[in-house]
Every structure is written in structure tokens, then in C-alpha cells.
């Protein structure tokens, strides 16, 4: 019998949602529900992983497997889960503080590996859960209402950082353009490799600068007739990266939405691992037999080989 086709509403849980009325996060989960329904995502094979923050609550609201992890540590959890079972579809929802503040080292390391994951950054320019302090995406000179003084630090450019870290799909969308965000999520899931979506997400309670009005006046969508972000040949990688970085500095009065960079040619971490361990994709750790006749038969060498690829980093 054909499995029942799930609707967007089926991906919504009954967990009580305490986001503030009007929060941009509602647009993000709405786009996720629609994208998952259109992709016919199997909830048992889809994992939503979130960090700590208002954004971190997302895993509770999506009716798939999920883990609400630690502040700054969503990416190590996600990589461990994906590499243990590469058949899973792994999505990460985390804040701009989570990914670009405390978790910045993990953010860069993921790009260098190109593990096949989708990272959705809730870009609200503040540490919303802890009441509005400056996040790394807040520009110098800006003073959202919880700050006593304007921010004296420069902001991180998430698109430029993702491109130069090695992410092979880098896009920006906006929580209020649900259709655009839904299509971007589907593209990111289909992409093989580390995908990053910078999602502009108004925090209506603590950010009185980057409001819906602010973004609605500035955003525009990149169109295929004059914008081509896709790498078709390895010789083009550098030029397409430079093009994406230049476009990402177009802020303030005009904010482009869309795919900035897409490179399907760089091998994923899973492919790199399977070159060293030919049995990896056929029997990844989650599919290994672990006991026979009451005795442990774990292939310790295989686990050591996989996880030693990370240990050299830290
Ligand atoms: C290790 C650790 N450090 C600090 C905190 C406190 N803390 C909780 S959420 C948060 C910031 C949240 O900001 P962001 O990641 O941007 O998420 P948002 O709430 O804006 O979605 C901080 C500093 C924590 N929970 N754990
Ligand atoms: S504090 Fe901001 S980000 Fe958090 S739920 Fe409220 S509006 Fe949303
Ligand atoms: Mg934030």
C-alpha cells in the first residue's frame, strides 16, 4: 500500500508555541512544513536539529525526528548523526549567535568538510532568548532597544564567511517570503554537500531596527536572466566565489535574496570518507551489527578511522 501523502499540517506538532506574536520564526517553520510536504519527506528519516535560542525551539515544532541540543553545538550533533547514518536528511535551525558567536569554529569546520547537511540560520541580529544583546550579524553603529549604546563591533558577513569556509550551497531568504524560503529549502536539501541559508528573521520584541518594514523596503530576488551562481567547471570555482562575495556586500539599501553560490562539484565528506573506507556508505556505523552470540563485534577500527578525521581539528 502506498504510504499516505502528508500535508504541510502533518509536519506541525501540537507542542505549545511560545514565540512572540508576529515573530519571524513562524514564517520559517511554515516554509519548512510546506517544503517537507512537497518533498514527501519521511518524518522518520528526517532529523531537525537545533541549538539554544528562540530559534532553538524549532525542533519541537516540526513533526520529524529532532534534537534540541546545546548553545553553539548544533553542528557537531548534526555531523555525528549524519555521518553515522548518511541516509538521513539532516536540517539544522540555529541562531546567528549560536552559529557565528559561540559556534563559529564549528561553522567554519563544517564548510571545510562539506558534509551533506542543511544549515538554516535565523538571522535576527540579536541574542533574542537572552533579551536582545548584539549578535554577530548586528552592524557597527546600530542600537536595537536592549543596548545602552550603539554597537562598536563590526558585523560578520554570513554569506561571505560561508562561501570562503567551503559551503557549496549558499543562499539568503526572508521569513516573510514563505514561498521563496520554501523553494530555497528544497533546493538546499536536494544539493549534495553543506548548504547554508541565511534567513532574515525579524525579532519583533528586541530588534526595532530590522523590522518587516525595513526588510520589505530593501529585499529583492536575484533573477536567472542576469545572475548565475552555479559552478559548471572546477576552473570556475574561484570566480563564482568572488562573484558571490561581491554580491553579499550589497547591503543597506538593497538586500539580495536567492542563491549566491552553488557548487555541485566538490566531493562531500561522506564521499571523501568512503574513498578511505570503501565499506562506509554500504554499512555506515548505524547499520553495523554490534553483537553476535552475546558478544560485542563492533568494528572499532572503522569508528576510529571515521572519527579521527575530526580529532585532528581540536
Ligand atoms: C554555553 C552557553 N552559553 C550561553 C548560553 C546562554 N544563551 C542562551 S540562548 C543565547 C543566545 C541566543 O541567541 P541566538 O543564538 O542568536 O538565538 P536567538 O534566540 O536569537 O534565536 C545565549 C547566550 C547558553 N545557554 N549556553
Ligand atoms: S524574542 Fe524575538 S526571536 Fe524570540 S520569539 Fe520573541 S520575537 Fe521571536
Ligand atoms: Mg539571534
Image: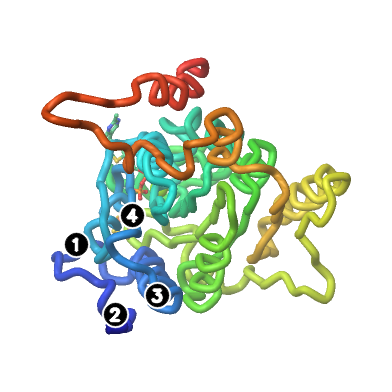
Disc 1 and disc 2: Cα gap in Å? Answer: 33 Å
Foreground mark, 4 or 1, reads: 4
Q: Is residue 50 left or right of residue 174?
A: left
- On the question of residue 308 being in view, the answer is yes
Q: Earlier in the sequence, mark 4 or mark 2?
A: 2
Residues at marks 1 and 3 touching, judged by CB atoms closer than 8 Å = no
Q: Quadrant of residue 292?
A: top left
Which numbered circle lies on residue 18?
1
Q: Which quadrant holds the N terminus?
A: bottom left
**Number of marks in the rendered image:** 4
Q: Which residue is mark 4?
A: 47
Residue 94 vs 232, above or below: the answer is above
Q: Picture coordinates of residue 101 (x, y %)?
A: 45, 33
Q: Which residue is mark 2?
A: 3
Q: Which residue is found at the position 38% from the left and 59% from the top?
A: 203
Which numbered circle lies on residue 170?
none
Q: Quadrant of residue 250?
A: bottom right
Foreground mark, 1 or 3, reads: 3
Q: For disc 1, does the CB lie below 8 Å from ligand 2?
A: yes
Q: Nearer the viewer, residue 106 or 37?
A: 37
Q: Which residue is found at the position 55% from the left and 51% from the top?
A: 196
Foreground mark, 3 or 2, reads: 2
Amino acid at each position: 500500500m502506498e504510504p499516505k501523502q502528508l500535508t504541510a499540517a502533518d509536519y506541525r506538532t501540537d507542542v505549545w508555541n511560545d514565540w512572540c506574536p508576529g515573530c519571524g520564526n513562524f514564517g520559517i517553520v511554515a516554509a519548512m512544513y510546506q517544503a517537507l510536504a512537497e518533498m514527501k519527506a519521511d518524518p522518520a528519516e528526517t532529523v531537525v536539529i537545533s541549538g539554544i535560542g528562540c530559534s532553538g525551539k524549532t525542533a519541537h515544532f516540526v513533526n520529524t525526528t529532532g534534537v534540541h541540543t546545546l548553545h553553539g553545538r548544533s553542528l557537531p550533533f548534526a555531523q555525528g548523526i549524519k555521518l553515522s547514518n548518511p541516509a538521513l536528511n539532516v536540517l539544522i535551525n540555529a541562531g546567528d549567535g549560536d552559529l557565528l558567536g559561540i559556534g563559529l569554529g564549528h561553522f567554519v569546520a563544517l564548510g571545510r568538510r562539506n558534509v551533506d547537511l542543511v544549515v538554516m540560520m535565523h538571522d535576527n541580529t540579536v541574542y533574542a532568548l537572552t533579551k536582545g544583546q548584539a549578535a554577530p550579524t548586528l552592524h557597527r553603529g546600530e542600537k536595537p532597544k536592549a543596548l545602552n549604546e550603539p554597537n562598536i563591533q563590526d558585523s560578520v558577513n554570513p554569506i561571505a564567511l560561508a562561501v570562503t569556509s567551503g559551503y557549496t550551497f549558499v543562499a539568503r531568504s526572508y521569513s516573510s517570503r514563505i514561498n521563496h524560503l520554501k523553494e530555497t529549502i528544497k533546493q538546499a536539501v536536494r544539493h549534495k554537500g553543506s548548504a547554508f541559508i541565511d534567513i532574515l528573521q525579524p525579532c519583533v520584541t528586541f530588534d526595532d531596527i530590522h523590522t518587516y518594514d525595513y526588510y520589505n523596503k530593501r529585499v529583492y530576488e536575484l533573477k536567472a536572466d542576469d545572475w548565475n551562481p552555479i559552478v559548471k567547471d572546477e576552473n570556475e570555482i574561484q570566480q563564482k566565489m568572488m562573484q558571490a562575495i561581491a554580491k553579499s556586500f550589497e547591503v543597506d539599501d538593497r538586500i539580495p535574496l536567492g542563491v549566491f553560490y552553488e557548487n555541485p562539484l566538490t566531493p562531500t565528506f561522506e564521499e571523501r570518507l568512503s574513498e578511505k573506507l570503501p565499506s562506509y556508505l554500504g554499512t555506515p556505523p548505524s547499520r553495523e551489527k554490534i553483537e553476535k552470540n552475546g558478544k560485542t563485534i563492533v568494528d572499532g577500527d572503522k569508528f576510529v578511522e571515521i572519527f579521527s578525521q575530526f580529532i585532528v581539528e581540536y
